Image: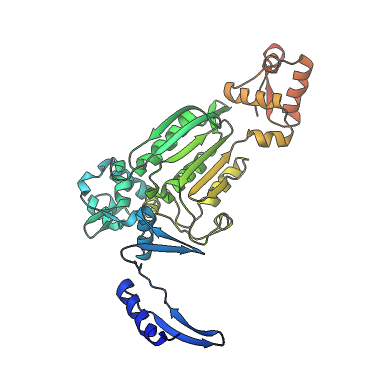
Amino acid sequence: MPDAKKLLEDIPNKVRDVLGILVDVNMHETPQGAYLEVEVEPYPNPVNYKGQYHYRSGATKQELKGVALDKFLLQKQGKRWDSVPIPKVKISDLKQETLMFFRERGIRSKRLPDSILPENAEQLLENLNLIEEGYLKRAAVLLFHPNPEKFVTGAYVKIGYFQREAELAFQDEVHGNLIEQVEKTVELLFTKYIKAFISYEGIHRVETYEYPKEAVREALLNAIAHKDYSGLTPIQIRVYRDKLMIWNEGTLPENWTLEKLLEPHSSRPYNPDIANAFFRCGYVESWGRGISIMAELCEAEGLLRPSYTVEGSDFWIEFKDLFNEVELKQRGLNERQIKALFFVKDNGKITNKGYMELNKISNRTATYELKEMVEKYNIFKILGASVSRHYVLK
């Protein structure tokens, strides 16, 4: 290598001038010949090549652009997407009713002191670390602005009820700031989409929902707090007759697996400023116990634990109700019994004659299968006698 000495001097100078970093170049002699070794130390700040940023993963290299470049630069600066300041948004632009609701809820949950109530909005936002160098952060706009979609596309929730996988029966959208989205979405789900079973304890009416309300609320809060808002896609909730699925665009913390997520773990929020605000107003805990809380609430109602799916930037949580078809078939119920179960779920009761007409079967078969629903599967109970005899959910 006749020009080795020159390269030992030129390479460090070229790297310094083009990339702005320092490297060491060493020459090594081997029986096969001499070679140069370039030593590059990891740099805490991003390094560009002629204005371009490149990322290597394994054997592939790609140029970072757009949202991917923004994420990379923020990560190198130790910042998160929700902590970036937004110019031209004033504190007076925020929704005062939401700020007051936030204060009152925080005081009730004992996460905020009583002294916070008379504080002005600027003091509250400063205490929540939602102001940086005089500018409101993205988190403040999402949490308290009356129309955050003016600044962040896709910052809302879509809900749909599906008869089958591709058969949408009806749908709704929930807009407004994140605090309003939490309250409005939970109310809409439990008044329009999720059925309540009615029973009586003496003269008192008791409503029992298909899914524990607090577990669904926890799942929604997790979706909103951990969503990747740079993806510009709304949170999607799909409700079926036997399951409920919540989707948000997001990723697990670096080097985490789904198995680790399901184990006891520390709190690693994707949007720390949003998560902190949710904690301060009593929406969530700060100890990474959301998964455990949902599991405990479902098991207390005799339901399966929620299941989770992570594929790329798709994050799904799925709740299955007591009458999930797959689970019912595994228990041994036949198609006619499952059909009758959903009929009772929708209509409150069924008679022997109704079972016969629903399934086009004989009285003998109907009587036998209804008896199984009562005695073998412990799903129905009998009310009334003789002519008024009917079956309801146990």
Residue 357: x and y, percent?
68, 14
Q: Is residue 5 above or below residue 325?
A: below
Q: How many numbered marks does the figure carry?
A: 0
Q: Outermost residue, front direction?
A: 2
Residue depicted at x 39% and y 33%? 173
Way the structure is coloured: rainbow
Q: Is residue 271 above or below residue 385?
A: below
Tell which of 98 and 358 is nearer to you.
358
Residue 179: x and y, percent?
36, 43
Residue depicted at x 40% and y 82%? 24
Locate residue 206 relative to residue 2 in the image: left or right. Answer: right
Residue 275: x and y, percent?
40, 53
Can residue 111 be seen by looking at this rendering? no
Quarter occupied by residue 77:
bottom left
Can residue 243 be seen by looking at this rendering? yes
Locate residue 381 relative to residue 147 in the image: left or right. Answer: right
Residue 289: x and y, percent?
51, 54
Tell which of 166 and 24 is nearer to you.
24
Q: Quadrant of the C terminus?
A: top right
Q: Is residue 168 above or below residue 101?
A: above
Residue depicted at x 47% and y 42%? 217
Q: Quadrant of the N terminus?
A: bottom left
Tell which of 10 and 167 is nearer to you.
10
Residue depicted at x 29% and y 40%? 147
Tell which of 341 and 89 is nearer to you.
89
